[in-house]
Image (cartoon, rainbow, N blue to C red):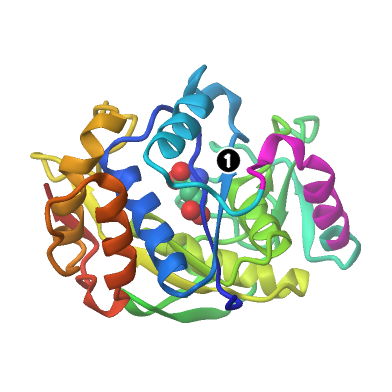
């Protein structure tokens, strides 16, 4: 067993569509090809955006097509204590702070918080932000190549916990990738520009940085990323066998011979080569 630990981390804002199926399959094949483990984590930290039944629809589809996680599924809504512990540590060391600035207060600086608070209403419920110095964070993405961001100018002091009490994705993903011992993150290119924030947060928390690989995302006829917001259709388990050869082709992988799904999946994983994935942010369907 290698030390490779990958994961798929969908948000239950709707059932899987072709784009999220691609991310699930690629992260799974990469883990299998490396002789590693593949974990599943439900990122349900934003109840207003959740769709009832989406978690069971996602788990049901993955199960029906034979993508079985190697360990019990993690659910972020049960992980608040770990997020609070991370926040407490950051606040004790002065790296995170309470902030009462509203969106309107930050409009003049393009929504970016840098340094001092400019809150107009001191009685507002506070968010918690991470203090971001003038620092450039870069990394070598296994698909997209070198990517670097001047963190203060691009994102500023970013939110870890919102004023309404919800934990930010950036905090939860970093805490959980480390807690699950993830060595390799394979996910959509829409999260490439979140990665420098995540790496900086890992350093603040004393956590290791996994390797990252950002896949091209699928684009619809208008050039938009397929998403639940633009009502990308749900994938049915019965269609996955027909879709897999196209997904393999989009990802630059060797052609799959027509066969039952389980056979094609084995071939897809056996042949998986991340070096063949096109270095592109998006692919038109
Ligand atoms: N939950 C995020 C999403 O569905 C993905 C998080 C990640 O892979 O880091 O877009």
Front in this rendered view, residue 127 or 112: 127
**Vertically, is 25 above or below 60?**
below
Inspect this view and state whether residue 199 appears: yes
So how many labels did they put on this image? Answer: 1
Tell me which segment is drawn in magenta: 72-89
Please tell me in which quadrant of the rendered image residue 26 appears. Answer: bottom left
* Outermost residue to the right: 92
Give the percent coordinates (x, y) of residue 124: 75, 30
Asked if disc 1 is less than 8 Å from ligand 1, the answer is yes
Give the percent coordinates (x, y) of residue 73: 63, 43
* Residue drawn at point x = 64 percent, y = 74 percent: 133
Secondary structure predominantly adopted by residues drawn in magenta: helix
* Outermost residue to the top: 52
Please tell me in which quadrant of the rendered image residue 192 appears. Answer: bottom left
**Vertically, is 279 above or below 178?**
below
Give the percent coordinates (x, y) of residue 95: 78, 65
Secondary structure at badge 1 equals: loop
Quarter of the image with the N terminus in it: bottom right
**Vertically, is 234 above or below 262?**
above
* Residue drawn at point x = 54 percent, y = 36 percent: 104
Q: Is 128 colored magenta in this rendering?
A: no
* Outermost residue to the left: 221
* Residue drawn at point x = 51 percent, y = 60 percent: 155
**Vertically, is 198 above or below 140?**
above
Q: Is residue 163 left or right of residue 190?
A: right
Q: Is 77 colored magenta in this rendering?
A: yes
Give the percent coordinates (x, y) of residue 46: 59, 31
Please tell me in which quadrant of the rendered image residue 240 appears. Answer: top left
Q: Is residue 260 left or right of residue 78?
A: left
Q: Which residue is mark 1?
A: 43
Front in this rendered view, residue 160 or 60: 60
């Amino acid at each position: 067993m290698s030390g490779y630990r990958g994961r798929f981390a969908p948000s239950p804002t709707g059932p899987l569509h072709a784009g999220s199926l691609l991310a699930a399959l690629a992260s799974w094949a990469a883990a299998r090809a490396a002789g590693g483990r593949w974990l599943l984590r439900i990122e349900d930290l934003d109840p207003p955006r959740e769709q009832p039944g989406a978690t069971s629809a996602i788990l049901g589809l993955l199960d029906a097509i034979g993508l079985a996680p190697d360990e019990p599924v993690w659910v972020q809504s049960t992980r608040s204590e770990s997020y609070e512990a991370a926040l407490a540590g950051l606040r004790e060391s002065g790296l995170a702070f309470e902030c009462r600035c509203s969106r309107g207060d930050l409009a003049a600086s393009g929504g970016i918080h840098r340094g001092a608070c400019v809150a107009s209403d001191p009685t507002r419920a506070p968010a918690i932000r991470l203090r971001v110095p003038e620092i450039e964070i870069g990394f070598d993405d296994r698909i997209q190549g070198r990517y670097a961001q001047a963190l203060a100018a691009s994102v500023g002091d970013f939110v870890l916990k919102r004023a309404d009490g919800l934990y930010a994705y950036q905090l939860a993903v970093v805490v959980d990738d480390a807690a699950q011992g993830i060595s390799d993150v394979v996910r959509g290119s829409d999260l490439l520009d979140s990665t420098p924030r995540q790496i900086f947060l890992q350093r603040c928390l004393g956590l290791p940085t996994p390797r990252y690989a950002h896949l091209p995302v699928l684009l619809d006829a208008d050039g938009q990323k397929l998403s639940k917001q633009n009502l990308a259709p749900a994938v049915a388990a019965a269609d996955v066998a027909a879709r897999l050869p196209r997904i393999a082709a989009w990802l630059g992988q060797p052609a799959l011979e027509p066969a039952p799904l389980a056979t094609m999946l084995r071939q897809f994983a056996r042949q998986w080569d991340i070096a063949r994935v096109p270095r592109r942010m998006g692919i038109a369907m």
